[in-house]
Amino acid sequence: MKVFKLIFKNALRHKLRTTLTIFGIAIAVIAFGLLRTVVTIWDSSVDAAGADRLITRQAVSFIFPLPVAYKTKIEAVPGVESVCGAVWFGGTYKDKSNFFARVAMDDNFFELYPEFIVSEEDFNRYKNERNGCIVGKSIADQYNFKVGDIIVLDGDIFPGRWEFVVSGIYLPQNKNTDGTQMLFHYDYLNETIKQNTPGRGDQIFWYIIKIEDIKNSAEISEQIDALFKNSTAETKTETEKAFAQSFVSASGAIITAMNFMSFAIIGIIMLVLANTMVMSARERTREYAVFKTLGFSAIHLTGLILGESMLIACIGGGIGISLLYPIVSGFEQVMPKGFFPFFFIEPITIILAVSSALLIGILAAVFPIHKALNTKIVDGFRFVG
């Protein structure tokens, strides 16, 4: 009990220094947790891809369209269950900062994506409204969209003023499901394009393909691409996960840098705490000599120094983790919904933060312990700090 009492008293001897150290550790833990959350959420968008879905796009880039006639040929490939065409619409809603995905797609889209939950009433309404659209719950909450509201978009890829009526709101099945999309009829888009710019009609940006057996995904992909080999619009078919990964890899350098920074912060925490412990050990050199004279063993001295280091690390880490949740929640509120479709702290982030705080508490005490144990009693009494 006396050792624990000494640990607390030593930790509070220099209140300002200890407070600043704890504050620094807490800030570092928050920064680590926030960066790791961004990285893991970015990666989670890839993990959310369906294993039984393939994507067929133009071989050069998905920004180049494919003929709508490809759909019938793809459907005839053995192992293909259903095919859905999709077109990235783009456009601007009120202001360019209001970013969310706007995609024209075939009506069987929701059959391929059961994780997008739409009520039967909303879907029937959607099918009967030519310019109807279904929006995700996240952007419906953000922009206060309700069934029957009119959404006006200024087209860029497809110029003009486009009006859509909200026919329904889909609910994400889980946290990893994107709830920030606006989906509408491809037929409406195609008919309007044919009227205004006939040369751009009957084109699809990518095809979503549901297959019967995921084990045959590679074989089916090869068969689809072989159909259009040496054509004016050759295709590249890949798993939905690989397709999503291509978007993530475009920002790979940024994500890698953020990943590196998150772990570099761990080193900063260690330096901050190590500096405090070295200063404390130096100031108490004479005290440790007295303890040795009174019969305190190496275990007692190790416990004093390690205990103080662990106490400061645990308090700082605990404060940082407790503040991480409200800070991440606030960060989620100010971030555009379309930029991060879902935002949550993964358990591994907390585990890494807690483990790091404990490990740093141990490592920061190594040098002071070594110094205290190897300083002779006589040298300790002679020391003037």
Image: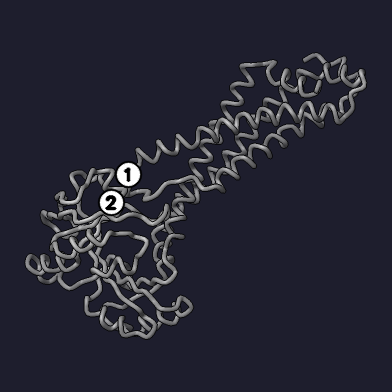
Disc 2 marks which amino acid?
Phe
Question: CB of mark 2 within 8 Å of CB of mark 1?
Answer: yes
Image position of 235 with respect to 168: above or below? below
Residue located 67% across and 25% down the image: 276
Residue located 42% across and 46% down the image: 343
Identify which residue, 133 or 76, lies in the foreground.
133
Q: Where is residue 182 in the image (x, y as percent from the top left)?
A: 25, 56
Identify which residue, 297 or 369, lies in the foreground.
297
Q: In this view, does 93 lie to the left or right of 61?
A: left
Q: Position of residue 244 (x, y in %)?
A: 40, 62
Name the image quarter holding residue 120.
Answer: bottom left
Q: Position of residue 171 (x, y in %)?
A: 33, 54
Identify which residue, 228 or 213, lies in the foreground.
213
Q: Where is residue 260 in the image (x, y as percent from the top left)?
A: 54, 46
Quarter of the image for the N terminus: give it: top right
Per the rendering, the mark at residue 336 is: 1
First in sequence, mark 2 or 1: give its number.
Answer: 2
Circle 2 residue: 100
Q: How many marks?
A: 2
Tell me the SS state at disc 1.
loop
Residue located 46% across and 52% down the image: 253
Identify which residue, 177 or 169, lies in the foreground.
169
Rounded to the nearest whole Å, what is the CA distance between mark 2 and mark 1? 8 Å
Disc 1 marks which amino acid?
Pro
Q: In this view, does 208 lie to the left or right of 307?
A: left
Residue located 60% across and 45% down the image: 351
